[in-house]
Amino acid sequence: MRFAGRRSPFNVNTSPFRAFEPSGTSISTGGYTPSPIGTPLSPLATDFAITSPTSSGWNGPGSPSSMNPPQQTYVSTSEPLNYRRLLERSVNCNWKYIVDKIVCNNDQQASIFLQQKLKIGTPEQRHAIVDAIVAQAYPLMVNRFGNFLVQRCFEHGTREQIEGIANAIRGNTLTLSMDAFGCHVIQKAFDCVDEDFKRIMVNELLRRIPETVVHRYACHVWQKLFELRWNRDPPQIMKYVNEALHGMWHEVALGETGSLVVQNIFENCLEEDKRPCVNEVLINIDLIAHGQFGNWCIQHICEHGAPLDRSRALDTVIKNAPEYSMDQYASKVVEKCLKVGGPEFLDRYLDRVCEGRPDRPRIPLIDIASDQYGNYLVQWILQHASPTHREQVASHIRKHMVSLRGSKFGSRVGMLCCNPSYGRSTPQHGNIGNTTRFNNRWGFR
């Protein structure tokens, strides 16, 4: 049904909602004017001014109090903490209470606040904050947010305060090194404490070498230890490490954490100190090269090892080239050798993989080209080797194009031989022919 007629004008005085209007309001044709709710903010409120007890009124630019230096203000912890206000340089509070909030409540905001206060506070404030931290140093070291605070104390504390933190570490080096948060404090301590304390920490670590070297947290402490440079006679660390890990270096190199430690030893230790480790790795090179984490140790020797060690590793790779080229992790060792070995290694590699057998006319190169891991190696050769080497490989590939085109991985290599520019196509055209692999630190593809 359609409404017919004129709409009557709205009359404020006859509004049906007038009975429900608040008593303090009035509606007029001039607009809505609410009455103030509560009390107006006072410029004298203590939350908005930091004044001396004797001052009164607003401290304007021309007032006498504005000419006096700012007074230190103490904020009681019985009130809710306003960290923004506490960051003001002239404001103090009960620092121990805030440290307790970190230890007892895992208060991240409290930790961030104290770290900021250490940067911008007065010398007296920094000293008082560090004292409060040193008093609870160990609980903070193993705390998710407190360990950062202890590390900052090494930078802002006095010599006596740093010694106080070192005394909290004494006797707890092993426990802290194997803690997810304490291990970071130990690493920082090795940079900041005196050498006498460093020797104490080292002696504690040497009590449990096999366990800590491969520990997921303590391994980082060992890496830091191998990187240290001593002003006086260094402790014979590797002497004890080699004795404890004799016959076990290959097991260490195969582990996720141990692989990092072994590579760190290769880079930072003296030749006579690392020789037992290097020799044992080379003896077990075949086993380690096939390891998910161990292959990185072999790659390190192939690229940075001493001439004799490098030659020994390259000879092993050439001897086992067909097998290594088709293994998920050993193929990464071959790839590294192709990149750093130069034309001489490539000559030896191609001679090995192009060598046929009387009972099988198909050479290993074709098997490698059609393998899910080996095809990347052949693609790399076709794209980066000299024209002579590229043609040598391409001539063998063309003889087996029917087989390779029927292979998911071999078709990529075959496409490169037919159209060398295919492998240099832009990424949006697909991944075929692109030799780039997802090759992170641990070799996942």
Image: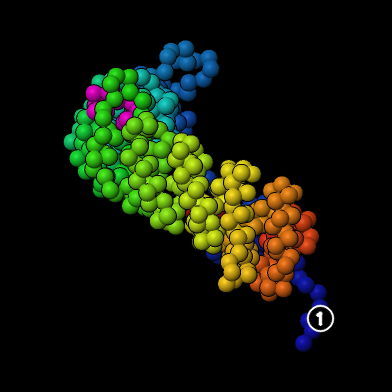
Question: Can the viewer see residue 28?
Answer: no
Q: Nearer the viewer, residue 300 or 75?
A: 300
Q: Residue furthest front?
A: 358
Q: Give the vertical position of 18 relative to 89 (above or below).
A: below
Residue 24 image point, x, y percent: 53, 52
Q: Residue furthest bottom?
A: 1
Residue at 38% from the left image edge and 51% from the top image edge? 284
Question: Can the viewer see residue 345?
Answer: yes
Task: Report if residue 308 lies within the magenta region.
Answer: no
Left or right: residue 164 versus residue 32 is left
Q: Give the vertical position of 52 relative to 406 (above or below).
A: above
Q: Quadrant of the C terminus?
A: bottom right
Which range is magenta? Answer: 189-199
Residue at 57% from the left image edge and 72% from the top image edge? 359
Amino acid bearing label 1 = Ala
Q: Nearer the viewer, residue 302 or 146?
A: 302
Magenta span: predominant SS is helix
Residue at 40% from the left image edge and 56% from the top image edge? 287
Residue 151 image point, x, y percent: 35, 33
How dense is the environment of label 1, judged by Cα within 10 Å: few (below 14), some, or many (20 and up)? few
Q: Give the vertical position of 63 relative to 364 (above or below).
A: above
Using the rendered view, name the quadrant where residue 164 is placed.
top left
Left or right: residue 41 versus residue 169 is right
Q: Give the vertical position of 258 relative to 412 (above or below).
A: above
Q: How many marks?
A: 1
Q: Quadrant of the N terminus?
A: bottom right
Q: Nearer the viewer, residue 259 or 360?
A: 360
Using the rendered view, name the quadrant where residue 44 is placed.
top left
The residue beneath circle 1 is 4
Residue at 78% from the left image edge and 72% from the top image edge? 7
Residue 316 image point, x, y percent: 47, 51
Left or right: residue 244 versus residue 370 is left
